[in-house]
Image: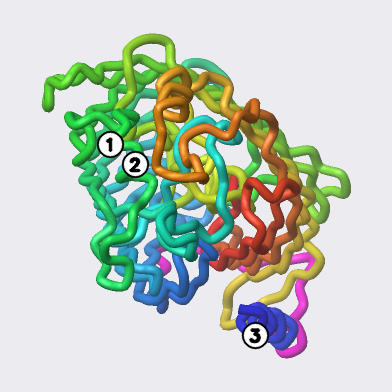
């Protein structure tokens, strides 16, 4: 991993040395731009990623550059950790007058999917997992999960920078025990939760979720992919009527996400922060959907957490789940060099960051405590730690290689400040700024 990061840094330096520096004037992009590329990435939670993708941009007559009129993306990739991804999404900014349209259609397949229990620090953490029978390292925190996701959202201007927004989403999720030969006959937390009733039989194999969304968006950003100033606020009501499976898991929730971009030195240095709150208002959420983060317009492939590369960077993926969650991301974005290369506009940026989050509404906490009291499987009790939930915090830094203000290659590393959130250095090579 260190060699991979070093190679990227050397590549970035090489580009700077061989390209034409251009701090004053950019090439205005017009019409269609096609970017077929190999997908080469890394994620501490998923492993090495390889595959292919195609980015398609339409900049129109260039009047709105660096903003685009249309963007579409196709991707097929797999991870050495046992996951694979097929994705198609589109972002259309001029198709609707004074509005935009977004869609995402994705299939995820994960032979090893992280599951750390409920309610953050209320669940014990064992480094690298542990075989409860033999006290050996194992796949305690893994299960299997496949997910098909289709989401479509649109927004339309009400007045000025205020918009109404609406969306619909459909999720088909299949969950189950780990089925890899190297971990055959090992007990996982998924198995234990199922036996204890913390995962109920009518939800243990997954199910279907229909999402209906309505909200308001206030947006004064100067750009979508890498804003240098402005705010972007989404406030959304999300209803999930259980009209497909009819297992009693209808629910209503509320999500607020606010981003603020403060210019410290024109476009070169920006302080950016994001505040998110997601809460259940009524009903019940099935266990297989507790990690979903509701959003109208996706920036990252994965919209789950807390933990991983889309929420609190550096803590265990899916390590903090509950009925309600809150999170904060803060970072400095220093765009330290601009240049032109292969007739495209590039710049490099560093982004040191500090993230935090926590559960604000517990999920089946009383049942979790009851399972702890009733457990008689050995000296190690996997259900309840006795700790109160608190802030999960991380520190890290990233490097960004940005082309035409819209295509962003991202390298990030972070470390959890509490060992209960993971003891290893988290690192990720992927795409886009977090927010």
Looking at the picture, how far across and down is residue 191, in whole percent? 30, 45
- Asked whether 27 falls inside the magenta stretch, the response is yes
Q: Report x, y in % for residue 231.
A: 66, 31
Dot 1: element? helix
Q: For the residue labelled by badge 3, is the local secondary structure a helix, a strand or a loop?
A: helix
Residue 163 seen: no
Give whichever of discs 3 and 1 has the lower sequence position: 3
The secondary element bearing badge 2 is classed as helix
Tag 2 residue: 192
Question: Is residue 307 visible to us here?
Answer: yes
Q: Is residue 10 above or below residue 238?
A: below
**In the foreground, 314 or 12:** 314
Q: Is residue 295 above or below residue 29?
A: above
Question: Could you tell whether 34 is left or right of 105 in the image?
Answer: right
Residue 343, image x and y in percent? 58, 79
Say which of marks 3 and 2 sits in front.
2
* Residues at discs 2 and 1 in contact (Cβ within 8 Å): yes
Would you name the residue on which mark 3 appears? 3
The residue to which callout 1 is attached is: 195
**In this picture, is 279 found above or below 422?**
above
What range of the chain is rendered magenta?
15-33
x, y percentage for residue 235? 51, 20
Q: How many marks?
A: 3
């Amino acid at each position: 991993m260190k060699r991979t990061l070093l190679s990227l840094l050397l590549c970035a330096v090489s580009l700077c040395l061989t390209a034409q520096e251009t701090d004053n004037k950019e090439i205005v992009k017009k019409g269609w731009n096609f970017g077929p590329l190999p997908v080469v990435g890394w994620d501490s939670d998923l492993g090495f990623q390889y595959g292919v993708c195609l980015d398609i941009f339409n900049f129109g007559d260039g009047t709105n550059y660096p903003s685009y009129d249309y963007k579409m993306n196709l991707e097929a990739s797999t991870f050495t950790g046992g996951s694979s991804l097929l994705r198609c999404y589109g972002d259309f900014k001029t198709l609707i007058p004074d509005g935009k349209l977004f869609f995402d259609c994705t299939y995820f397949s994960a032979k090893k999917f992280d599951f750390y229990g409920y309610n953050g620090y209320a669940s014990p953490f064992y480094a690298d997992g542990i075989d409860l029978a033999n006290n050996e390292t194992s796949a305690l925190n893994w299960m299997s999960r496949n997910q098909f996701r289709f989401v479509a959202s649109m927004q339309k201007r009400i007045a000025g920078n205020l918009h109404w927004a609406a969306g619909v989403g459909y999720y088909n999720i299949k969950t189950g025990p780990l089925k890899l030969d190297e971990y055959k006959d090992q007990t996982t937390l998924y198995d234990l939760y199922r036996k204890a009733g913390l995962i109920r039989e009518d939800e243990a194999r997954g199910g279907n979720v229909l999402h209906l969304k309505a909200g308001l968006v206030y947006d004064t950003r100067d750009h979508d992919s890498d804003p240098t100033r402005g705010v972007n606020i989404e406030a959304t009501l999300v209803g999930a009527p259980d009209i497909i499976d009819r297992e009693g898991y209808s629910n209503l929730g509320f999500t607020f996400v606010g981003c603020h971009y403060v210019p410290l030195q024109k476009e070169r240095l920006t302080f950016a922060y994001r505040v998110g709150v997601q809460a259940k208002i009524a009903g019940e959420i099935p266990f297989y959907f507790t990690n979903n983060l509701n959003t109208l317009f996706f920036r990252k492939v994965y919209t789950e957490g807390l933990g991983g590369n889309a929420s609190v960077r550096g803590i265990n993926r899916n390590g903090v789940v509950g009925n309600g969650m809150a999170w904060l991301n803060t970072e400095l974005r220093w765009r330290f060099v601009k240049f032109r290369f292969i007739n495209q506009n590039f710049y490099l940026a560093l982004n040191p960051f500090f993230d935090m989050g926590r559960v604000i509404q517990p999920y089946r906490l009383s049942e979790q405590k009851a399972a702890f009291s009733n457990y008689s499987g050995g000296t190690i009790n996997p259900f309840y730690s006795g700790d109160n939930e608190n802030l999960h915090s991380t520190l890290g830094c990233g490097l960004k290689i940005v082309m035409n203000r819209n295509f962003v290659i991202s390298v990030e590393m972070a470390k959890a400040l509490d060992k209960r959130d993971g003891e290893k250095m988290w690192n990720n090579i992927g795409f886009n700024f977090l927010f």
